[in-house]
């Protein structure tokens, strides 16, 4: 644990959040430059699992996974194996069916392809069957002309990015993440997209009760077509934990996520491990769309695979006020991001899910405290 004032202050905050019943278990890790300045945990492994959270406890972090998968894609761009402006069909010919032949890689991974809807009624195999997910993307018809709107591909993004990575590299995205990101960074046992067997004692349990629709919800809304309410409880099942879903079932520690983003915050490398060249970072920060999201219901600033920092009406989210910050939040409150302008990387993992939407703000409190303590506001 770092002997820093900011670490002590964050530790006290998350312990108080747990004591107030606002958190069950939480990990926080932050880097400033190549140095770990926060690495602390609090709380329990689950509402019905009183074991203490450890630094190596694994949290299923929902769409935080997208940031890890997007990093894999930008590594392929850096290596000359992938062109963001090329059609997806160049790398994945079958994807081009049904009017999708012109969708570019950048459009597809910035949620502009119109393929956000999941099958209905929801069945667990819609998450666990990888090959069937790829086929659905190939056979799918866009809900709107690609590039004319944006709708968050909450689940389906995983098969889109997976098909692109496999077509461009010849490797399964699960293997690429494990071998090209996790292992070189020294976090091979703390970064999984699809968990192996034998990790049961390190898996936290999610309280997903807050993620269901309210009594007044319109279940025909695009939000629920993209994120079927019946899916949430299954994420604690081992079949879901072991499946590969690069859009939403990554199991991470906060320190693994923070280390990856620390590399990106510092020109693409840390401790002589290079993920991308410095000039590649600009592509991660480049705005692709800032329109009103048809699924999330408000304007969202998205780059190629990441969400961008933003300040709206004087109030910023957990990534802070700078538009050049990038990363990805996950449903319920986990987040990981970097702010290269101030060489800051932060990761927060939680298992008590806050309601979907902008109301979440235990995570915001944590991130704001880190910025204030490090004079990075």
Image (tube, helix red, strand yellow):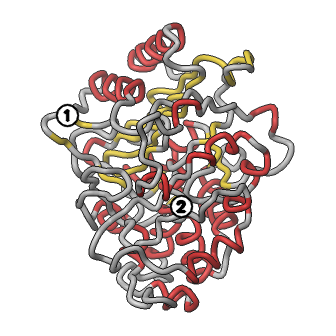
Q: Residue 50: x percent and y percent? A: 73, 15
Q: Earlier in the sequence, mark 2 or mark 1?
A: 2
Between 364 and 278, the one lying in front of the other is 364
Callout 2 secondary element: helix
Disc sitting over residue 336 in the figure? none
> What residue is at 72 percent from the left and 50 percent from the top?
240
Disc sitting over residue 315 in the figure? 1
377 horizontally vs 145: left or right = left
Task: Give me the C-alpha separation between circle 2 and circle 1.
Answer: 28 Å
> What residue is at 65 percent from the left and 45 percent from the top?
251
Question: Is the C-beta separation of discs 2 and 1 under 8 Å?
Answer: no
Between 197 and 24, the one lying in front of the other is 24
Q: Residue 304: x percent and y percent? A: 37, 66
Quarter occupied by the N terminus: top right
Between 230 and 176, the one lying in front of the other is 230
Q: Residue 303: x percent and y percent? A: 33, 62
Q: How many labels does the image show?
A: 2
> What residue is at 33 percent from the left and 59 percent from the top?
294
Disc 2 target residue: 69
Q: In which quarter of the image is residue 41?
A: top right
């Amino acid at each position: 644990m770092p002997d820093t004032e900011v670490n002590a202050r964050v530790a006290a905050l998350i312990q108080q959040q747990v004591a107030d019943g606002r958190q069950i278990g939480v990990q926080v890790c932050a880097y400033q430059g190549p140095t770990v300045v926060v690495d602390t945990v609090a709380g329990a492994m689950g509402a019905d699992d009183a074991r203490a959270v450890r630094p190596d406890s694994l949290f299923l972090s929902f769409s935080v996974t997208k940031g890890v998968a997007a990093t894999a894609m930008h590594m392929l761009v850096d290596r000359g194996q992938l062109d963001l402006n090329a059609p997806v069909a160049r790398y994945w010919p079958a994807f081009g069916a049904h009017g999708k032949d012109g969708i570019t890689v950048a459009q597809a991974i910035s949620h502009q392809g119109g393929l956000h809807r999941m099958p209905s009624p929801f069945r667990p195999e819609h998450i666990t069957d990888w090959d069937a997910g790829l086929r659905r993307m190939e056979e799918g018809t866009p809900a709107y002309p690609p590039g004319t709107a944006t709708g968050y591909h909450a689940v389906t993004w995983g098969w889109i990015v997976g098909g692109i990575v496999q077509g461009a590299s010849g490797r399964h995205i699960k293997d690429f993440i494990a071998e090209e990101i996790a292992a070189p960074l020294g976090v091979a046992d703390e970064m999984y997209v699809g968990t192996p067997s034998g990790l049961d004692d390190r898996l936290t349990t999610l309280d997903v009760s807050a993620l269901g629709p309210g009594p007044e919800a319109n279940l025909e809304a695009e939000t629920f077509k993209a994120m079927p309410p019946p899916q949430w409880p299954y994420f604690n099942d081992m079949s879901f934990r072991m499946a590969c879903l690069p859009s939403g079932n990554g199991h991470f520690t906060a320190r693994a996520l923070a280390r990856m983003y620390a590399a990106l915050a510092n020109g693409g490398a840390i401790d002589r491990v290079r993920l991308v060249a410095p000039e590649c970072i600009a592509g991660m920060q480049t705005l692709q769309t800032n329109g009103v999201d048809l699924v999330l219901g408000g304007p969202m600033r998205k780059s190629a695979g990441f969400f961008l920092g933003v300040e709206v009406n004087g109030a910023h989210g957990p990534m802070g006020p700078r538009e050049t910050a990038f990363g990805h939040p996950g449903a319920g409150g986990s987040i990981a991001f970097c702010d290269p302008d101030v060489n800051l990387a932060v990761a927060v993992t939680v298992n008590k899910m806050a309601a979907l939407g902008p109301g979440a703000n235990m995570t915001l409190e944590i991130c704001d405290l880190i910025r204030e303590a490090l004079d990075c506001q």
